[in-house]
Image: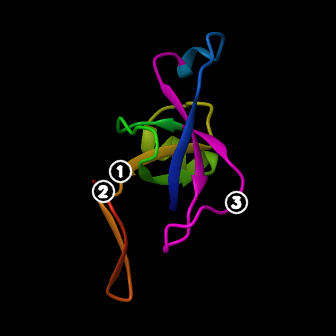
Amino acid sequence: MLICRVVGTAVSTIKHEKLKNLKLLIVQEVTPENEITGSPFVAIDTVGAGEKEVVLVVKDNPATMAVLHQQVPTDAAILGIVDSLSVKGKFTFKKD
């Protein structure tokens, strides 16, 4: 799993049939210290996440298919919204 921050949304009116009614969010990986790293990518939102939230993402097609229990053509899915991050006893992120 990856720790990511939601940095935007992606809207697609024409897409694969199995992606209809699924929200697409742009996420970017963060370090445990809550610093953005890496390139942004699109993930299917399965939990109702919103802009600027820190989320848990599973990446790669076999993992996402196992979680979504169907043949959805995606390689990333948001599975959780993070309430807090702590490294060595010090909070690096707390949800408002």
Residue that carries the numbered disc 3 in the rendered image: 38
Crowd band around label 3 with a 10 angstrom C-alpha radius: few (<14), some (14–19), many (20+): few
Q: Residue at x 72, y 53 (%)?
A: 39
Q: Residue at x 38, y 89 (%)?
A: 88
Residue that carries the numbered disc 1 in the rendered image: 81
The answer to which quarter of the image holds residue 48 is: top left
Look at the image and give the residue range highlighted in magenta: 20-43
The answer to which quarter of the image holds residue 42 is: top right
Residue placed furthest toward the right: 39
Crowd band around label 1 with a 10 angstrom C-alpha radius: few (<14), some (14–19), many (20+): some
Picture colour scheme: rainbow
Up-down relation of residue 7 to residue 20 (above or below): below
Assign a secondary structure to mark 1.
Answer: strand
Residue 41, label in figure: none
Tell me if label 1 and label 2 are in contact, CB under 8 Å: yes
Nearer to me, 43 or 66 = 43
Residue that carries the numbered disc 2 in the rendered image: 95
